[in-house]
Every structure is written in C-alpha cells, then in structure tokens.
Amino acid sequence: PILSFNPNSLNFNVGTNNPIDTQTSTLTANLPINVGDVTLSSTANWVTLPPVSLGSPLNFTVNASSLPIGVHNATVTASAPGFVDAQL
C-alpha cells in the first residue's frame, strides 16, 4: 500500500513584500484507508499543514516572514500504518 502526492513537489516564490504563499497538492492512497490513520508532518515550522483529506486538493502554506533571504527547503511527509510514506 502506498500514499502519494500529486504533484509531488511545490516551489514557492515569496519575498519581503509577499512572505506568505499557498499552493495545493492532492494526497491519495492506492488502497482504501481511514483518513484518521494518516498524519502529516513537516521538517520546517514555517510550513502550515492542512487537515488531512484524501483525493481533494490540500492547501500548503509557507510563511517566510521570519526567514533570511535565500533558498529554503522543507519536506512534508504523509504517513499511515502499513503504507509507504509519501513525501512532498
């Protein structure tokens, strides 16, 4: 069983005058799963995670207002018992 994001990567372009941006990705599973068993986590606290849903676009928001100028990376992971994790 596998979880997957589509698209599986997002690129945000934020700046001093516009430090917040939102983009979407859809999380799916190739076998039936209880949505309550799925958790989302992020490697960065400047990424806001949405409530978990399957098959509908999820809104991922970045808030770069406290970050220094430059390129920053984060990984969002969707996990569930018995399923291969999905990374975004």
Image (cartoon, helix red, strand yellow):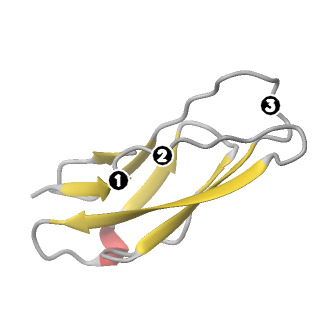
Instruction: Tell me, yes or no, whether the two marked residues, 1 and 3, touch with CB atoms within 8 Å.
Output: no
Could you say which is closer to the camera, residue 29 or residue 38? 29
Residue 86, percent from left and from top: 29, 49
- Is 17 drawn above or below residue 6 in the view shown? above
Q: In this view, does 49 lie to the left or right of 69?
A: left
Find numbered disc 1 in the image and state the secondary structure of the residue it sits on.
Answer: loop
What residue is pinned by disc 3? Answer: 67
**What amino acid type should be assigned to the residue bearing mark 1?**
Pro
Tell me which residue sits at (35%, 53%) in the image.
7
Residue 10 circle label: 2
**What amino acid type should be assigned to the residue bearing mark 2?**
Leu
Tell me which residue sits at (40%, 60%) in the image.
39
Tell me which residue sits at (90%, 44%) in the image.
17
The span from disc 3 to disc 2 (Cα, nearest Å) is 18 Å
Find numbered disc 2 in the image and state the secondary structure of the residue it sits on.
Answer: loop
Q: In this view, does 29 lie to the left or right of 64?
A: left
- Is 55 drawn above or below residue 77 in the view shown? below
Label 2 packing within 10 angstroms: few (<14), some (14-19), many (20+): few
Where, quadrant-wise, is the C terminus in this rendering?
A: top left
Could you say which is closer to the camera, residue 45 or residue 59? 59
What residue is pinned by disc 1? Answer: 7
Residue 59, percent from left and from top: 55, 66
Residue 53 occupies which quadrant of the picture? bottom left
Tell me which residue sits at (82%, 24%) in the image.
68
Residue 29 occupies which quadrant of the picture? bottom left
Instruction: Tell me, yes or no, whether the two marked residues, 3 and 2, touch with CB atoms within 8 Å.
Output: no
Residue 50: tell me if it is visible.
yes
**What amino acid type should be assigned to the residue bearing mark 3?**
Leu
